Image: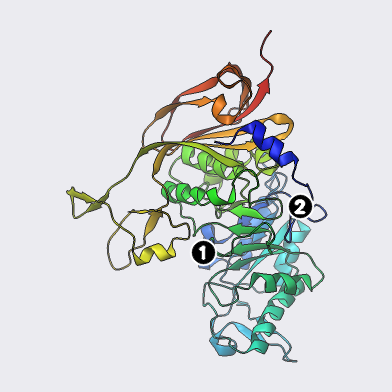
Amino acid sequence: MRPVAALLAALAAIDAHEEVGTGCKAGVDCKPPRGWRSWNCYADEVTQSRMMAIMDAFVDSSRGISLKDLGYIEVGLDDSYQLCRSGEHNSFHAWTNDRDKLVAMIDTRKFPDMKGMVDYAHERGLKAGFYANNCICMEMNYHKNEEIEAHYQGDAFDMLHYGFDSIKLDGCGEFKDLERWQRTLNATGKYYAIESCHWGLDAPTREWCPYSYFRTSKDIKPTWFSVFKNLQTMHRFLEYPKALSRKGCWAYADMLEVGNLATYEENRSHFAAWAITSNPLILGLDVMDQKTLDSVWDIISNEEILDINEVWAGHPGFFVKRQIAYFSPMLKGSAEERRMEELTEEQLADLQAEPNLIANIEGGMTQAWDYISHMYDQIQIWAKPQPNGKLAVLVLNNAAWSARTRIRFKDLGFPGGDDAHVHVRCTYEHEDLGSFVGHIDINHLKSHDSRLYVLTPQAAAA
């Protein structure tokens, strides 16, 4: 539970200029970024022509407003631009003629004019994101200090040469020194937004955050189980009253799978959950697929939800309470044989390791494990302070069946407890629901559906 009154009082004591790290300087990175990255859509089949077509789609205003107008302004390239095994030590970096830097060797069959692609983004008022420490043909064979330094310098040179505005630093290769990345990029004289994609490792402290936003989780998948699992990795970065996630140092549970999930309800719950926790809103769907885009347009263009995501009223959002439904036993062999599986070596790969259960067992030699870091919750409630004493509240049904629930205002810390008078607005329907005393009931919440309300405390009637 996070009492609102106590939370706001504590936050008022925090110096507004206390934030550290690369971000929130002169208005830069002071809001969670919005944009799109290529991996969830194209994986290793990304090309320059596809990137440029996405950029065109971002400025398309045929729906009355464009993605760019809605604040989705960065289009990011995720891997697979490189010419594998073409450089030093069978890598994709090679020395410049003066042997001063090791620069990336671009696969010009796929990206014939990288600078032209970046210029194309800028001409449309967009930003372009690059990617380094790649996972495809990862580089692990640089051992001499001068070569390692030349590699960092070469990537910084590439960023400046091609004109990129931001960079995603993955955790696959050997170039994982985030402070070194920050120093090297800053030395170019241009400010870059930095995403640390180290899967929950190298998390920030209050004093250390050499990036603009950081991954809290492993890679997301287009399933509700994966979305909910990744949301749970946000808990430790949203603590009360001073969260590690903050302006210019945003916790990030990976790219959005909105548009790729099984139902409309899952898509909007996913979007709302990322919004209320101040996650960067990085789309991953094919925005040129008009049918898919139409199916989620009212979700990703909902300006009330976008406002909840970007506004800063002292805290990035927090977990309020859960209603625990059940543990899910694992099937093994037959429907009659059920038992819990215990993690052993696989737990080492779970970066949020608590007592865990294994789920989604497929079997076979290529088994991919999924993990649950908490018991299955039927209902979760999350909240985020809004300006003028308002509070955004998300009610999320994780169960495989419909549920009914009650939001008690005393659980949210509103003065008056069971007698608190609160005005309720539904952001999904853009509708004022009226004033409620003590609580609001939700009588039918479908499986994996949610409600996102904005609550405004009111003086009790005389």
Mark 2 or mark 1, whichever is nearer to me: 2
Residue at 59 percent across and 46 percent down: it is 239
Mark 1: few/some/many CA within 10 Å (<14, 14-19, 20+): few
Q: Reading the chain from its start, which is encountered first: label 2 or label 1?
A: 2
Of 315 and 49, nearer the camera is: 315
> Secondary structure beneath disc 2?
loop
Say which mark, if any, is on residue 43.
Answer: 1
Give left or right: position of 79 versus 388.
left
**Residue 14 in view in this figure:** yes
Of 367 and 353, nearer the camera is: 353
> Secondary structure beneath disc 1?
helix
The residue that mark 2 highlights is: 18
Give left or right: position of 266 versus 284.
left
As drawn, 270 above or below 357: above
Picture quadrant where residue 184 is located: bottom right
> Could you say where residue 238 lies in the image, as x and y percent from the top left?
59, 47
Of 357 and 368, nearer the camera is: 357
Residue that lies at the very extreme toward the top in this rendered image: 462
Mark 2: few/some/many CA within 10 Å (<14, 14-19, 20+): few
> Could you say where residue 300 lies in the image, as x and y percent from the top left?
60, 42
